Image (spheres, rainbow, N blue to C red):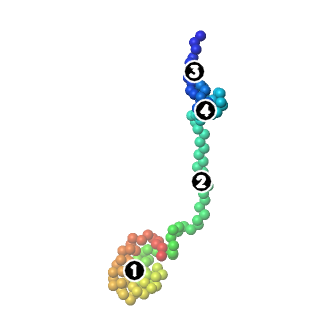
Amino acid sequence: MEETQVKTKFCKYCGEKIPEDAIICTKCGRQIEQMKTDNPNIVINNTNTNTNVNKNTTVGYTGKPKNKWVSLLLCIFTICGHKFYEGKIGMGIVYLLTGGLFGIGWIIDIISLLFKPNPYYV
């Protein structure tokens, strides 16, 4: 009859010889190693229960929306009309009295209005 040799190891708590694949010591009963599983039980729950309660479509913008093209036409043909359209009465009066800050502010406003989104917020 052929005898098979069982591989052994020592318990780290009591020092007894135990089978190599043992998880619990056969003498002292203490757990030697963690159980090894090929398929760990992992639960992934990725359901999104968030609801958007923000009814405002202009999130991140403050002020009143203004049309870019109306403001640009007012700027070109009246020099100061776009400032009154935006609600900036004081700057409108300054533009009116100085000719659009001597033409420099007027040209800068035309260029800046061309690159603004439509609508823009003031």
Q: Is residue 107 above or below residue 7?
A: below
Q: CA distance from mark 4 to mark 1?
A: 88 Å
Circle 2 or circle 1, nearest the eye: 2
**Looking at the rendering, which quadrant does residue 70 occupy?**
bottom left
- In this picture, is 114 found above or below 51? below
Marks 3 and 4, Cα distance to the nearest angstrom?
21 Å
Q: Earlier in the sequence, mark 2 or mark 3?
A: 3
| Circle 1/circle 3 CB separation < 8 Å | no
The residue carrying mark 2 is 48
Residue in view at x 38 percent, y 89 percent: 97
- Label 1 neighbourhood size at 10 Å, few (<14), some (14-19), many (20+)? many
Decide: is 13 above or below 43.
Answer: above
Nearest the eye: 51 or 11: 11
The amino acid marked with disc number 4 is Tyr
* Callout 1 amino acid: Cys
- The residue to which callout 4 is attached is 13
